[in-house]
Image (cartoon, rainbow, N blue to C red):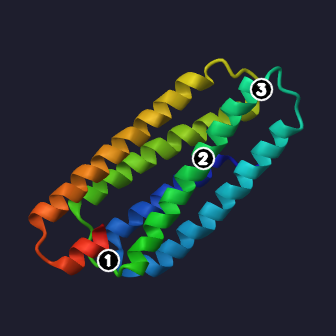
């Protein structure tokens, strides 16, 4: 089974290429979508692997579902973001977006490491702490997005740019 951390690392790395090579956004977005599909396969393989095992209680199954769902969310967000660059004809990357891409990368690596660790062990005792940590990343991303939107409406005067970035 392919290492999900490697796939997520490649996916976020390719997403980061949008900052440098914005003119190639259509090609880059296609590469991200391919990696997202690879990550989906891995998450489904992981879910199937655990589905075949007997959980000692339903709480463990719920924790595993949450973790796999986090993986799906990470890969979907990365793919949606890359596709948005093409859909909205983004020709310049705003500084705020660079920091958001770094945050997405950090969260994705955390989730990927967790999935890989779960493949090696059957202990779910630390899962709740990890889920809380990932939710912290998510909360920070929501705050960052709200701040970026606020700044966009304050400082951007071109309505087309506001629509693109919103």
> Disc 1 marks which residue?
90
Disc number placed over residue 71 in the picture, else none: 2
Q: Secondary structure at mark 3?
A: helix
Q: Residue 28: x, y in percent? A: 48, 73
Q: Please name whichever residue, 127 or 149, is drawn nearer the observer in this view of the structure.
A: 149
Query: On the rendered structure, is 70 left or right of 103?
Result: right
Label 2 crowd (10 A; few <14 / some 14-19 / many >=20) = many
Query: On the rendered structure, is 49 left or right of 112?
Result: right
Which residue is depicted at the point 47% across and 72% down?
83
**Dot placed on the residue nearer the N-terminal end, 2 or 1:** 2
Q: Residue 22: x, y in percent? A: 34, 75
Q: Secondary structure at mark 1?
A: loop
How many angstroms separate mark 3 from mark 1 (CA)?
Answer: 45 Å
Q: Quadrant of the C terminus?
A: bottom left
Q: Please name whichever residue, 166 or 35, is drawn nearer the observer in this view of the structure.
A: 166
**Dot placed on the residue nearer the N-terminal end, 3 or 1:** 3
**Dot placed on the residue nearer the N-terminal end, 2 or 3:** 3
């Amino acid at each position: 089974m392919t290492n999900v951390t490697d796939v997520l690392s490649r996916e976020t790395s390719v997403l980061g290429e949008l900052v440098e090579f914005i003119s190639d956004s259509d090609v880059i977005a296609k590469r991200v979508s391919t990696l997202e599909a690879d990550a989906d396969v891995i998450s489904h393989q992981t879910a199937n692997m655990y589905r075949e095992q007997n959980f000692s209680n339903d709480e463990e199954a719920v924790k595993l579902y949450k973790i796999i769902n986090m993986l799906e969310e990470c890969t979907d967000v990365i793919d949606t973001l890359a596709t948005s660059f093409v859909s909205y004809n983004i020709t310049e990357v705003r500084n705020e977006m660079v920091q958001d891409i770094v945050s997405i990368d950090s969260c994705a690596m955390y989730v990927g490491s967790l999935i890989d660790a779960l493949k090696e062990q059957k202990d779910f005792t630390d899962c709740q702490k990890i889920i809380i940590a990932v939710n912290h990343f998510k909360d920070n991303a929501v705050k960052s997005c709200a701040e970026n939107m606020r700044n966009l409406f304050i400082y951007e005067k071109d309505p087309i740019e506001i629509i693109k970035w919103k």
